[in-house]
Amino acid sequence: MSAPTPPRRGDRVWNDGLIARRTRPAPVTRPLPPPERQTPPVRPSAPRAPRGMTSPAGQALRPRLDALRELVGLSRARLDRRTLAEAGRVLEEAAARQRHSLDLTVVAIAGATGSGKSTLFNALARAQLSEAGVRRPTTAMPVSCAWTDRADGLLDRLGIPARARRQPVRPYDPTLSGLVLLDLPDHDSAATGHREQVDRLLGLVDAVIWVVDPEKYADAVLHERYLRPLAGYAEVTFVVLNQVDRLTGDAADQVLDDLRRLLDEDGLALGEHGEPGAAVLALSALTGAGVGELREALGLFAARRCAAEMRLTADVDGVSSRLRAAYVADGRPGLTEWARQEFEDRLAEAVGAQAAGLAAERAWRREAERACGSSWARLRMWCERRGKGAPGTAGDGAGDGEQTLVAGVPVPRRTASRPLVERAVRALAYEASAGLPGPWAQAVREAAGRGAEGLAEALDEIAASAAADMVAGAAAGARRPGGGGAGGRHGAGGRTGSWRTGAGHVAPEAEDSGRATLRRGRAAGAGASERPRWWRALATGQKTLLAVQLLGTAWFAGACVGELGGPWWGPGALMVGGAATAPVLGWGGRLAARGPARGFGLETERRLRSAAAVCGRARVLEPVVAELLRYREVRAQYVIAAGEV
């Protein structure tokens, strides 16, 4: 902090503004000037560290900038550079502005050729600091005037050369303390470099005073190129109708009313009746009429010490509004439970889960009939199998018709339906991306497309494993479901049994889980593959009936040759009774097998459906859900950045 100005000779008043008065002033020997003419000296404050965002506007702006920074980081892989370029520029400019004092207010005076910008600049500074004349263009470079000694860093950032930096008449006017005023070149200058300087500085200053004159206040270039695009900066905008001294009273009011109408059409909110918005004033910089009112408005504006934060807030508002289409969706996007279930049902249909369940039920019933049927029926079935030829060479399996042998039984090699798999993935991608903004909908579709690669082959392995397990389980008596429930020993959960749940580029976690499930399924199947006890009981009964029939036949043969005696109806009763009871016993076995066979078929269908669902979740559903979660996170950051919380 700079040392206080030493007291003048004859004026021994101790008043440095910081230390309390220690003594009473000594009697003076000469009269003091009248109070109304005495102007207390205003000492420039010493340079100090930049003020942080301590105002209410700054405290509200800080989390929005943080959210916008996070938003840009999360969106780099989804949005193109041009979409995020403006947001990146706003963040860079905000960081650059925060490195300087935020309690200083940088205001630029902008306008068209001949509007009187330099004259107004000099009138506010109360000195001839900027050249004003009839030569066009008069202002070739921006000129600054700072009511502070701490503006060098800001002026360096703005690119104001040292030769164009001016100081107002000292002592500083306390009304404008902390104000940095810029006189810009003409925005419609014939020199291209002048327009480029104006455009560059308008993106850096905290506020703008637009100076218009009665002739060019409705200029289309001003309204379409500047005022309309900058409508969101109304709270840091002043619109001044200069040269009203050239108009009569009624004409000035009419021009001012028409100017307000044009500004309203541009979407620029006007600060009337205490509402926030742009200030619209009429003055004459040449005669000084109305300049005091503008100076007072600038003083109040600079005294708030939050113009920079208001400007940055308007920047964030503008970029958030332009990014809205990239982040805000129509409705509530996401995957519903119905869409997930529909996807799993389509995959189950693709691998033929229902058909596999019915086939498993038929295989179980055939094995039960072979195990519990009469001896003559088993002989007939054996002859039929022998008559069909060698196994593994015939069949019409679903897919390419190839067959493999499992426990000596030909198993058709099943393949998943490619059209159904593609339809399932497309339907899921459509449901997940419905209502999303374009870039995020594309990301969801791409994630689903990547997951679909190799999905059909993985489902082929599941279907083949299911067919092998079906035949092996049926040949071994399947499970022992305790009377034939749909859940079997494993209940109604989503366990995949001994079937692999995918191959290729499936996530390592899902692959490890599938292997662990495979081991658990095999271990459980080893203990559950015993033949039901009632099978053995019926088989024993059939053997007993066969022995009775053979005994009756031998007795009858012996009676015919006279070797054996006894009543004539004895051997007949044994043969007829054995022959009649065996089919009845087999029929009872078939009735008893219906329930367990149905349970085995349902369990087979459930396991195949569950295995296909696990594979689909690992390959397609989880990547799609990850993209949706990323969108939700980005959407939450956008809501904060846009100030919608």
Image (cartoon, grey):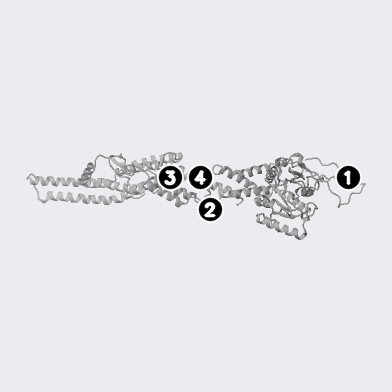
First in sequence, mark 4 or 1: give its number: 1
Residue 16 falls left or right of residue 423 = right
Residue at far bottom of view:
250
Q: Position of residue 96 (x, y in %)?
A: 67, 41
The number of numbered badges drawn on the structure is 4
Q: CA distance from mark 1 to mark 2?
A: 74 Å
Q: Residue at x 22, y 50 (%)?
A: 585
Question: Judging from the image, what secondary structure is the residue with disc 4 in?
Answer: helix
Whether residue 490 appears in this view of the structure is no
Question: Judging from the image, what secondary structure is the residue with disc 2 in?
Answer: loop
**Which label lies toward us, 1 or 2?**
2
Residue 22 falls left or right of residue 491 = right
Residue under circle 4? 443
Q: Position of residue 368 (x, y in %)?
A: 27, 47
Amino acid residing under circle 3: Gly
Q: CA distance from mark 3 to mark 1?
A: 91 Å
Q: CA distance from mark 4 to mark 1?
A: 77 Å
Q: Quadrant of the N terminus?
A: top right
Whether residue 350 appears in this view of the structure is yes
Amino acid residing under circle 4: Ala
Q: CA distance from mark 4 to mark 2?
A: 17 Å
Q: Neighbour class for label 1 at 10 Å: few (<14), some, many (≥20)?
A: some
First in sequence, mark 3 or 1: give its number: 1
Residue under circle 3? 616
Residue under circle 1? 11
Q: Neighbour class for label 2 at 10 Å: few (<14), some, many (≥20)?
A: few
Residue under circle 2? 330
First in sequence, mark 2 or 3: give its number: 2
Question: Judging from the image, what secondary structure is the residue with disc 1 in?
Answer: loop
